[in-house]
Image (spheres, rainbow, N blue to C red):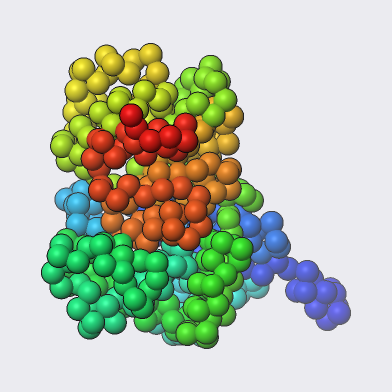
């Protein structure tokens, strides 16, 4: 082949990107969806993934997947301390990621990676990108509004908002309207968590670009503020799920009997209830949720993930009286095909924990929400759902059966509880 032919062949080659998701359901989904979007747009995609929650490779024949060791013990994997888990992941995966990236660059000399796209939680990846002279683009798996709050945590701490939180929960945060003090993300291991968040924010600012799974019409003021403050190229190319569903990247077996059950229900009659893949609650909270559902008298499809109640196997924590009272109008599964559920004609509302993927999926299907945030960005997302975007309501008292009953009746029937 002459030089002209070689040049033409080189120009026709698809450019390669390396993507690196955090191995948690709410982070894997958007990264895999982004990979599919980029692949359709003409890129070759390699995915580096931890051994923990490693994907079923048969689901992704279009990608080259490299599994790296994460060094996590069974005890470390099962910890309920998310901050400690993420810190260990960052510590353990820095070396294997560097080695894997070096190997990719040395082996694939004809089509080497031109950039890496990593979840923002991987705080070591900017240093790795710099060492190989590669651009690093960050995928934020949260909303822009919540990122701005995370970035403002040092300021909020300095101004005393995080001191004596219980005494001023209903006060407005002047610097971040429409948030109230109770909407500020707080964490059990607060000092370590705030340090980790600050590290993540600082490393995100150094990136060559930030991709958000959002869209301009939803978060335009927040996107403007972000670009004005940090001057990092920002790309709002969501919602990803409208391009590709998350079904292939689910870590849980989806119970499709939920769709068959919905097929037998009246249009817009069913409340879908799911608190995501990580949230947990205690026995008292579970009882409040159950009896709030029962007292509302509304049909419901409820995802009760094993372990939703700490230490539980599945439904043994639910009162027998509740199960008997709701047998004819409630359906409980371990996991559901959420996007398909939300698009079903029988769904009239969604009671959610306020995770970002869930909110986007609900907005995308025009389903109004009740939000019961549990931790992290969910607090901010839920306030925006109720007060800014006005696509649902937030349960202000937490998990309390009277407010639950009233909220469900208002959402589903447009009236307060009797």
Horizontal and vertical percent position of residue 367: 53, 41
For the residue pair 207 and 324, the one nearer the viewer reads as 324
For the residue pair 343 and 182, the one nearer the viewer reads as 182
Instruction: Say whether residue 69 is left or right of residue 211.
Output: left
Can residue 75 be seen here?
A: yes
Residue 152 to residue 388: above or below: below
Quadrant of the frame with the N terminus = bottom right
Instruction: Say whether residue 197 is left or right of residue 300.
Output: left
Instruction: Place residue 107 in its image quadrant.
Output: bottom right
Quadrant of the frame with the C terminus = top left
For the residue pair 238 and 320, the one nearer the viewer reads as 320
Residue drawn at (53%, 17%) of the image: 264
Residue drawn at (69%, 56%) of the image: 40
Instruction: Say whether residue 376 is left or right of residue 212.
Output: left
Residue drawn at (18%, 28%) of the image: 317
Horizontal and vertical percent position of residue 340: 55, 35
Farthest residue, direction front: 418
For the residue pair 271 and 197, the one nearer the viewer reads as 271
Residue 300 to residue 382: above or below: above
Residue drawn at (29%, 82%) of the image: 155
């Amino acid at each position: 082949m002459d030089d002209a032919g070689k040049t033409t062949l080189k120009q026709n080659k698809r450019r390669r990107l390396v993507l690196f998701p955090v191995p948690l359901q709410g982070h894997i989904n958007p990264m895999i969806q982004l990979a599919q979007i980029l692949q359709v747009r003409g890129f070759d995609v390699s995915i580096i993934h931890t051994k923990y929650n490693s994907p079923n490779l048969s689901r992704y024949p279009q990608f080259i997947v490299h599994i790296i060791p994460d060094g996590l013990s069974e005890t470390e994997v099962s910890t309920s301390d998310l901050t400690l888990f993420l810190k260990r992941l960052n510590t353990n995966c820095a070396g294997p990621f560097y080695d894997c990236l070096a190997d990719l660059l040395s082996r694939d000399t004809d089509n080497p990676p031109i950039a890496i796209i990593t979840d923002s939680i991987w705080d070591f990846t900017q240093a790795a990108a710099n060492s190989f002279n590669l651009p690093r683009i960050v995928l934020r798996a949260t909303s822009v509004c919540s990122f701005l709050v995370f970035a403002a945590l040092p300021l909020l701490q300095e101004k005393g908002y995080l001191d004596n939180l219980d005494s001023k929960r209903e006060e407005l945060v002047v610097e971040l309207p429409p948030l109230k003090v109770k909407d500020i993300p707080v964490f059990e291991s607060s000092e370590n968590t705030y340090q980790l968040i600050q590290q993540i924010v600082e490393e995100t600012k150094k990136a060559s670009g930030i991709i958000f799974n959002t869209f301009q019409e939803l978060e335009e003021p927040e996107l403007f503020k972000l670009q004005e403050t940090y001057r990092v190229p920002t790309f709002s190319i969501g919602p990803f799920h409208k391009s590709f569903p998350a079904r292939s990247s689910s870590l849980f077996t989806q119970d499709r009997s939920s769709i068959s059950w919905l097929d037998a229900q009246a249009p817009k009659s069913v409340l879908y209830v799911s608190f995501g893949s990580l949230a947990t609650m205690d026995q008292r909270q579970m009882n409040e949720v159950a009896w709030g559902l029962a007292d509302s008298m509304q049909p419901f499809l409820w995802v009760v993930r094993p372990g939703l109640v700490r230490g539980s196997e599945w439904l043994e924590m639910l009162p027998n009286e509740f199960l008997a009272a709701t047998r004819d109008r409630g359906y409980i599964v371990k996991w559901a095909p959420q996007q398909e559920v939300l698009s079903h004609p029988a769904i009239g509302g969604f009671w959610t924990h306020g995770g970002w993927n869930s909110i986007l999926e609900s907005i995308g299907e025009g389903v109004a929400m009740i939000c019961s945030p549990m931790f992290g960005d969910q607090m901010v997302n839920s306030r925006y759902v109720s007060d800014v975007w006005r696509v649902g309501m937030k349960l202000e008292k937490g998990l309390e059966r009277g407010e639950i009953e009233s909220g469900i009746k208002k959402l589903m029937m447009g009236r307060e509880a009797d």
